[in-house]
Image (cartoon, rainbow, N blue to C red):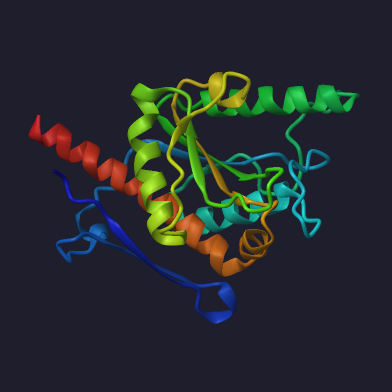
Amino acid sequence: MKKRFIMIILAVLVCGSLFTVYLRRDTSKSALSSVRFPEEQLIIDAGHGGEDGGAVSVSGVPESQINLSIALKLDAICGLYGISPVVLRTEDTSLHDADAKTARERKKTDLINRVAQIQEYPNATLISIHQNNFTSASAHGAQVFYANPELSLPLALTTQDTLRATLDPDNDRVAMKIGESIYLMNHITCRAILVECGFLSNQAEDALLQTAEYQTKIATALLSSWLEYQRDATEQELDG
């Protein structure tokens, strides 16, 4: 049975602007020393945006802003290793058509435009960043969703394990197949996961999700999961 990454995150030195990321295997060798950076394109989607703020936290912060902060941190960490992801939005704006008149039209065209951008990269992995919300204030923990099991389940399982180890060892949530009503995830053909990073309805988790340190931990966990998946896929290819 393959050994999994145990990821340790040390982040953010001077004013939160510098990141040092360490990934470690059980063998005590640095994972980065053995990882061949993938040729496939990484795509980062910060869910919602603009007037579509998504869920609103118990402290009044829209989901779209937290999603964007995590996405930009993930992009920055990727840059440290020469990885150039496609970031679907870099500001708190929607990607709707300019001539969309109603909120419904803007939401619809926003999703269509995101799908179109993703579909430009057939050999890609999408990480879509979101936040959860529930009627019970006690619900907590990151959870990963996928649409196509054949393409995306291995990455989803790896990411769920890494988020648990990094953020909350007591999180018993598991990676799950996403519902057919989620337009973006069900209209793209590349490998893709949607990550609900935490519950904005949980006061303690909401507070964490708004800190740069916690956002950096999430971003680092997402990148390390993708790299681990690539490493495992490469090893399987070589063994096969």
> Residue drawn at (46%, 20%), measured in percent from left and top?
189
Quadrant of residue 104 in the image?
A: top right
- Looking at the rendered structure, the number of numbered marks drawn on it comes to 0
Q: In this view, does 172 lie to the left or right of 235?
A: right
Measured from the top left, where is residue 14 in percent x and y? 54, 81
The residue at the far left in this view is 239
Measured from the top left, where is residue 154 in percent x and y? 32, 34
- Quick check: can you spot residue 80? no
In this rendering, the answer to whether 13 lies above or below 150 is below
Closest to the observer, 16 or 221: 221
- Quick check: can you spot residue 153? yes
Q: Is residue 222 left or right of residue 197?
A: left
> Residue drawn at (43%, 24%), measured in percent from left and top?
122
Closest to the observer, 86 or 190: 190
Measured from the top left, where is residue 97 in percent x and y? 79, 26
- Quadrant where the image shows the N terminus: top left
Quadrant of residue 128 in the image?
A: top right
Measured from the top left, where is residue 94 in percent x and y? 76, 37
Closest to the observer, 40 or 206: 206
